[in-house]
Every structure is written in structure tokens, then in C-alpha cells.
Image (tube, rainbow, N blue to C red):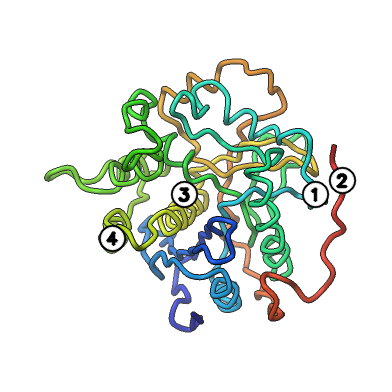
Amino acid sequence: MMVDPLKITGAGDETLVLGIDPGPVRPTAPSAWSVLSLHRNTGRIDIVRPATAIRKTALRDSLVALLSFPDLRLVCLGAPLTPLPLAQKPLRARSVEIRLSRGAFSASERGPGMPWIATPRLWPHYVQARPLQEALEQRGFPLITLPADIDSVRLPSRCTTEVFPKASLALLTSHKTLRKRPLAGEFCGQLDDWSFPRLFTEMESSPPPIQACLQALSPGLHLAPEALAEARRIAAIRRPYSRREPLRAFVAALQGVVALRGGACLVGAPGDHEGSILLPATWHPDWEAEWRINRRIFQVHRYPVEEPDPSASLPPPHESLFPDSRFSIDKPAAKPVECR
């Protein structure tokens, strides 16, 4: 599926965010993308293109046009990323993965349970995302990194960030509430499948809880009626159609919009083989209490994300295109390094 950039370019004070979920590693498995816009003056979040589940080869074709949008500032990728590529599976997990899988964050405690690239289960996801990351960098969307000795991070004019949609949703919800959801193998037992409709759909005559969450993260930030309708559409997707990939792509894009309004943080550690996760800046008190517990991962911190300089002009997007091979790029990639 090709995308016409002329039909989805932001206008006036709009800034665009692209959320991508590469999906399972199987070649025939679906991936998904979603494009949201932020009206900087009003805080209104609109749907530019609905979350769409597509084949991986179609994702490649769509990116050619998507990354050419003049108003696109941020790409949020739901996959493990490192500043420098790894040539082989590391023996140790990234620090942020360890921190976000301990205590209440662990799957055994019904938390988001961030998986580790050092395991055979997640390593293929890292390998799948690496060419995509290289392609984004070539198109002018480099992965944001954490320099040493910093207190906060200002978003550059264009960049890519790693997101973990399960954690983005979990941190806005009470841990006690998450523990009451069905078991993982039951209907809606997965954290994102269960929490998404509870956050994004109306409760009788009151607005959905996500509106209050967004307001707390950045005053004035809110989902437009069309964006809420899109969330309801995603929540209602049932088999044989895949819901998980569009859901995570939508949440990834929304997490990026929150960052553009200064309502996000980067959780991670400096280092070529570490990385950081873009998450909400303000967490539910249950998770704030968990974060304050010393888990012996001293180098992992929460770095407030400052919104981009509004006076800075956007450079034109790179015009180079992808070759025919899946997620490959025109020039040699950075040489992978071995990490033990």
C-alpha cells in the first residue's frame, strides 16, 4: 500500500508523529503504522491516518512516502534498539530491560514485563528492527541517545525513539487494577489488550480516562473526537483481523505526541549498547512507589524530555529511497560490534 504524502501533510501549526509496530518475526506476520497530528497551539490530537495492519513488504513501501512528510518530527518504533548495532546476541540484557522487568514491573507480578534482547525470544525482534532503524537514520531520523552527565533531553528537529506500548499504558493505570485482569492465556489477558479499551473508551456519560491522563501530562492536551473514534475502532477489532499491531502502533504514535508537548521522559542508560524507552513523564502512584525502590540498577534514570525548540526550522527530509530488498538501505550500515 503506497501513501500519498500530499494527502497527509500537516497544515499550519500541526506536527506529525509516526508510530510503527514491526509485528511478530514471521515473514507473513502483519506489521502496523499510525500517524497522529498535534496542534501545537490547542493541544488537540487528531488522526492523520488510522492505524493500519499491513504486510512487512507493504510497510517498506509505505515508509518511502511516510518519511517524506515535511511536518513529520518523530518516529516511535515499538522494537528494541541500540545506538550502535550488535553483531550477535549479547550475554547480558540492557539495563533498562532489567529495570523494567523487576519488582512490580515483572510479568509474574502482572506488570508490563519488558523482555530482554539477551534471550532467544526477543533477539529475533532486535534483528528484525535493525535494518528498519538504519533506514530511518538514513532518511534523517536518527535514534535519540543519552549522553553522559545530562539532566534532561531536548528532542531534536527529527528523530526516532524506542517505545514500549505495554509500559506506556501500564504506567497510567493502578498496578492493583492490572493484577485483576484475566490470565495471559485468557481473552484480553495481555496487558495492552486489557488496558487499552479501559483507558480509551467512554464510561457511561463521562469522558474516557485517557483524557484526564493527557491533561495531567500536559495541560490542554486532548484527543479529538475523531481520535477517540479511532481508539474505539481499534478496541473493537476481532479475529480474524489482527488488533495487537494497530493498537501498539496507535499507542506508539500517541506516546510521541505526548513527548512533543513535554509530557514524556526517557528511561534508560548511556552507552553504545544500552538504549532508552520513551514513556509518560508522570506515573500512577503505584509505579512511582515501585520506581523509588532500589533495584541495584543505579545507571538507569528517568530523563525529562523537553519539547523541540518551536523556533527551529525543520530541515527537508532526505530524498533517498529504499531499494527493493526488505528494509535495506542504499549505503553500507554502521559496522556491527560484538558485545559480551
Gap in Å between the C-alphas at discs 3 and 1? 30 Å
Residue under the image location 55 percent in, 74 percent down: 66
Mark closer to the chain start, 2 or 1: 1
Left or right of residue 338, residue 71 in this image: left
Residue situated furthest top in the rendering: 294
**Which amino acid, by three-letter code, is at mark 2?**
Glu
Residue under the image location 53 percent in, 70 percent down: 71
Residue identifier under label 3:
258
Residue identifier under label 2:
338
Q: In what element is the residue under mark 2?
A: loop
Gap in Å between the C-alphas at discs 4 and 2? 44 Å
Gap in Å between the C-alphas at discs 1 and 4? 38 Å
| Residue 32 versus residue 125 in the image, above or below | below
* Residue 17, x across and y down, in percent: 51, 62
Gap in Å between the C-alphas at discs 3 and 4? 21 Å
Q: Residues within 10 Å of mark 2 (few under 14, many from 20)?
A: few
Residue identifier under label 1:
86
> Dividing the picture into quarters, in which one does residue 187 lie?
top left
Q: Residues within 10 Å of mark 3 (few under 14, many from 20)?
A: many
